Amino acid sequence: MEFEERLASLAAKVRQQKSAIQTEEATKNAFIMPFIQNVLGYDVFNPLEVIPELVCDIGTKKGEKIDYAIMKDGEIQILIESKKIGEPLHINHASQLFRYFHVTTARISILTNGQEYRFYTDLEAPNKMDEKPFLQFDLLDIDDHLVPELQKLTKSAFDVDSIISAAGELKYVGEIKRVLVDLFHQPDEDFVRFIATRVYDGAITQKVREQFAQLTSKATTQFLSDQVNDRLKSAITSSAQPVIISQAPAEAPPQMSASPTESANEKDRIVTTAEEIEGYNIIKAIVRTAVDVKRIIGRDTISYFGVLLDDNNRKPIARLHFNRPQKYLGTFDRDKNETRHPISGLDDIFSHSETLIATARGYEM
């Protein structure tokens, strides 16, 4: 499997199983050990690569343990401290990491709850772990920009100098992005004034500030939505996965071809949302256990987002009806009859895993 596929597979597992995990130990077994082994590529059963429960006696502190230490070239390179899935991560949870970081050869430490991973190094003072992470990664909200940076931590690509040299930029870019998110969702007075002075010629009175607080919030929301839609359209139309204007049922007679003007107008009406893309990725993660993931193709239409096997209209796996407030997942039986299941969120797709897998396997017979 490619690195991205292994990452997506673990993300699907976390999404499907997290509600069943009740303890830190279960979190380690279900999510963190697979992350170390399947994503980073270190053998969790080889003590020359991964040391669990590493004892870190320092001064008067006796018997404390680091959950995992990852070895490479005979030296400790990465320390990992684990918490239970769902437990918020805070720097106060990393006391063992702080204490042990400066007395080992490790330059990277990780604080995780199995879903969110925070990566630390020593940018501010040599051999002293920073209080702020240089990289934050959430398996249920994967930032594609960070995937190559995470890949640098894998066994086959591990280069501590390269990681540290990129860490400073990653840290501050991440913090700037979080500041922008806060400003876009809840603009503060300085940001509102900054915007208002560039588009309003009059005096910035209290009434004007109140008005522009609402306008700024509305404008930033629309701006972000426009950016997302434009990038999704560009990505889909330029990829190998075609955007289909309409899709007739498998047994339907051929339809008359639309005129170029009609086709262009219909294409303009297709908007692929981030939620549809995420739903498609969930279905791929489920069905890839039955067929090669490269054979699972997504097509968007005006009324639904379709998932096909082999890019073949006669092999529908599922349809995502996400264009109305009540969302539906469409599944298919052996006769290609569609059944629509109301869903309240993307996690509900996992409850139909057996049906989706059975549908994909049915086309192999």
Image: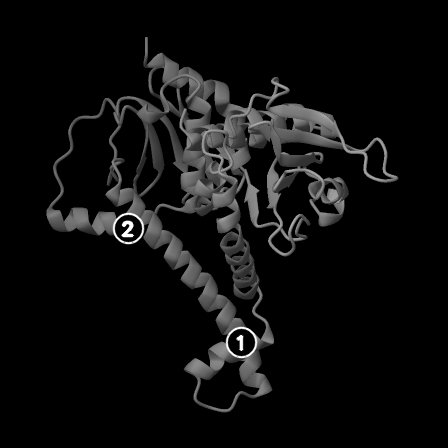
Answer above or below: position of 209 versus 238. Answer: below
The disc placed on residue 211 is none
Q: Residue at x 47, y 28 (%)?
A: 6
Q: Residue at x 42, y 57 (%)?
A: 225
Name the spot of residue 220 as percent of width and height, x first. Answer: 46, 65
Answer above or below: position of 289 versus 58. Answer: above
Q: Residue at x 25, y 33 (%)?
A: 247
Label 2 is placed on what type of residue?
Arg
Within 10 Å of disc 1 (Cα), the crowding (few <14, some 14-19, many 20+) is many
Which of these two is toward me, 133 or 289? 133
Name the spot of residue 93 as percent of width and height, x first. Answer: 75, 43
Quarter holding the C terminus is top left
Label 1 is placed on what type of residue?
Val
Q: Residue furthest right?
A: 60
How far apart are the two marked residues, 2 and 1, measured between alpha carbons? Answer: 34 Å
**In the shown orientation, is residue 207 left or right of residue 286?**
right
Name the spot of residue 221 as percent of width and height, x first. Answer: 47, 62
Q: Secondary structure at mark 1?
A: helix
Q: Residue furthest bottom?
A: 203
Q: Residue furthest top?
A: 365
Image coloring type:
one colour
Answer above or below: position of 197 versus 258. Answer: below
Q: Is residue 329 visible?
A: no
Q: Residue at x 61, y 47 (%)?
A: 121
Q: Nearer the viewer, mark 2 or mark 1?
A: 1
Q: Is residue 302 visible?
A: yes
Which of these two is toward me, 278 or 165? 165
Residue tagged 1: 192
Query: Do callouts 2 and 1 mark residues in contact (Cβ within 8 Å)?
Result: no
Q: Secondary structure at mark 2?
A: loop
Residue tagged 2: 269
> Which quadrant of the view contains residue 51?
top right
